[in-house]
Image (cartoon, rainbow, N blue to C red):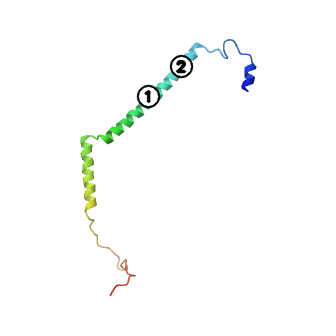
Amino acid sequence: MHAFLAFLPRPEGGTIKVSREWVEASDWFVLFTLGTLLFLLGAFAIWAWLIWRRTTKPEPHIKLLMELEEESAVEARTTMPEVEPEMRAPWEQPPDWWRKEAP
């Protein structure tokens, strides 16, 4: 296909004559699109940096809340839960009714 195009006559002034106003508009469109893309990339980079900074260097009141939460989690793990008495209906058997009692 490309070899065939080489034999076709070409116009002297290019393929299509485009007025200068259209060229400027297309240039401005490309510049606006690139500006928008760079702005969005910058916004996402700043957003990611803010998230990273908040997790590595929290503010003092958030740091205090995190420490209190850790302390309460440690206390919850060390304390034994209270055993609640089993509430069974009168017709229910104990859970190990099938085991034989050792003499």
Mark 1 or mark 2: which comes first in sequence?
2
The residue located at (40%, 33%) in the rendering is: 45
Q: Secondary structure at mark 1?
A: helix
Q: Give how far across and how far down residue 42 sits, in percent.
A: 41, 30
Horizontal side, residue 57 vs residue 23: left or right:
left
Tell me the distance, in whole angstroms, between the alpha carbons under discs 1 and 2.
18 Å
Identity, as a three-letter code, of the amino acid under mark 2: Asp
Residue furthest to the front in view is: 3
Residue 60, quarter of picture? top left
Q: Which mark is residue 55?
A: none
Q: Which mark is residue 39?
A: 1
Q: Give how far across and how far down residue 39 sits, in percent.
A: 43, 28
Identity, as a three-letter code, of the amino acid under mark 1: Phe
Residue furthest to the bottom in view is: 103
Residue 100, quarter of picture? bottom left
The residue located at (72%, 25%) in the rendering is: 2
The residue located at (38%, 35%) in the rendering is: 47
Q: Secondary structure at mark 2?
A: helix
Where the C terminus falls, by quadrant? bottom left
Where the N terminus falls, by quadrant? top right
- In the image, residue 68 above or below residue 91: above
Q: Give how far across and how far down residue 27 sits, in percent.
A: 53, 19
Q: Which residue is mark 2?
A: 27
- In the image, residue 40 above or below residue 19: below
Residue 18, quarter of picture? top right
- In the image, residue 103 above or below residue 86: below
Q: Give how far across and how far down residue 17 sits, in percent.
A: 64, 14
